[in-house]
Amino acid sequence: MTYKKESILQSIRSDIVKGLMAPGQRLPSIRMQSRKFDCSMNTIISVYQELEKEYLIYSRPKSGYFVVAQEALLPLIQTKRIDFASAAPDPSSIAQKDFRQCMNKAMELFEASIFTDPDPQGLLSLRQEIVKLFHQQQVFSSEQQVFIFSGAQQALHLLAGMPFPNGKTNILVEQPTYWGMLASLKAQQQTVIGIERTPDGIDWLTLERHFQSNLIKFFYTIPRFHNPLGTSYTQEEKQRLAELAQAYDVYIVEDDYLADLETNSKADPIRAYNGSSHVIYLRSFSKVMLPGLRLAAAAVPNSLIPILQLYKHTADLSTSVLSQGVLEIYIQSGMYDHHAKQMRSLYNQRINKLKDIARRLLPEDSLYSIESSGGLFSALRLSDVNKEELIQQLNHRGVDVLAADPQFLTTFPKMNLLRMSIIRTDERDIEEGIRIIAEEMERSERTRVSVKPFSWL
């Protein structure tokens, strides 16, 4: 099963088992789900087939798929799953009533624009709001420098494929990193070089050598709350990145997807430093708002505006006007700031709970990046534990985890890591889940030690 399919399967399964989808409720169509999860319809069909095998959903000819009756779900609900795998927000944490109000208002205010061909770069009024939002993060840009994308994945795909003013062609990525970026680079057959990122950061001599000698078009980095490590660069490291990028004419693609979860008011992005002429600052709204809105925004250097305008226009003509209208109203009304503060508090409590429980129950050598500064993710290291067997055993006990393997280049040495997400786990789930992981790791270790290799006497 592919990483993407497994992630989607766990997300929908979690919604059903937690009762967020009522028995008898019709599931979204295959086409709608493929858009929501940014995948092929065949992937959704395969996911629905898996859920049918688990007796969670059933199909009606020409009507679609439906959640099974309450009686059939009862055994699963009584053994609620603990989800450390998902990266999509828990629907119960989203202020859906507020979104419906914004949606209705957007239908009124942007009715005329819905039936026209808007600016491929994004609604001017929304870009003006994004400029204000970015200023709060010390990212100072003009509305001409701001682009609205149909999700961060679209932005990364376009940036990977288009030429840059420096005339270079190779792309440098941290290892590990966001799997969606790696998938896009692979699909486009780009030349990609990896550089190791550990909880201590990166090797600066190696980075400078790549910048100097390997024709690096851009360096893709997640400086804040890294996926999957959860770690962040220091302010000194961010400034050094900006200076090196400018010195060697290498662009930085700064994926600041969790900027809303920052608790340190002095933690500025790379773009805030004097390398802004070489930094593309990218923000997603999927972790705070509804992922299905498929919206992201970027502030780009002036040198990239003309070529990015062309590539954006050829990709989709324009991002959904209705989605843009909803985001604009959500920001203007103050709802966005209010909800972001709530999510910041919620996720900060959860990640701290994860750190505390993991330190107390797990072996010290497994706490690879458990001291992460915040965000959604941390990584566990499995030294002598069989990862596949552990994941399978945890699945049997109702705990969902994901291996970090797809977050490495195929040519780069992989570490035996599990990515731990707290986005869909409350504090009780975290404590119970870590306890089960500790038990299974101990059981696996006992099994390994007890199986001694045969030797001739």
Image (tube, rainbow, N blue to C red):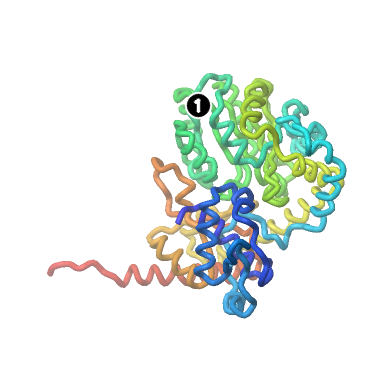
Q: Is residue 62 above or below residue 35?
A: below
Q: Residues within 10 Å of mark 1 (few under 14, many from 20)?
A: many
Residue that extends furthest to the left in the rendered view of this protein: 457
* Residue highlighted by disc 1: 216
Amino acid found under the numbered disc labelled 1: Ile
Q: Position of residue 98 (x, y in %)?
A: 82, 55
Answer with left or right where residue 411 lies relative to residue 372: left
The reply to whether residue 272 is in sight is no
> Where is residue 294 shown, x and y percent of the image?
67, 45
Give the quarter of the image for residue 345. Answer: bottom right
Front in this rendered view, residue 198 or 392:
392
**In the foreground, 370 or 337:** 337
Residue 84, above or below 439: above
Q: Which residue lies at the image location 56% right of the left edge and 48% below the top edge? A: 39
Q: Residue at x 50, y 26 (%)?
A: 216
Mark 1: secondary structure = strand
From the top left corner, tell me how far across and down residue 336 is, in percent.
80, 48
Residue 242 appears in view: yes
The quadrant of the rendering that contains the C terminus is bottom left
Name the quadrant containing residue 162: top right
Instruction: Tell me if 307 is positioned left or right of 405 in this view.
Output: right
Q: Is residue 116 above or below residue 404?
A: above
* 1 versus 221 height, above or below: below
Q: Quadrant of residue 251?
A: top right
Q: Position of residue 208 (x, y in %)?
A: 50, 28
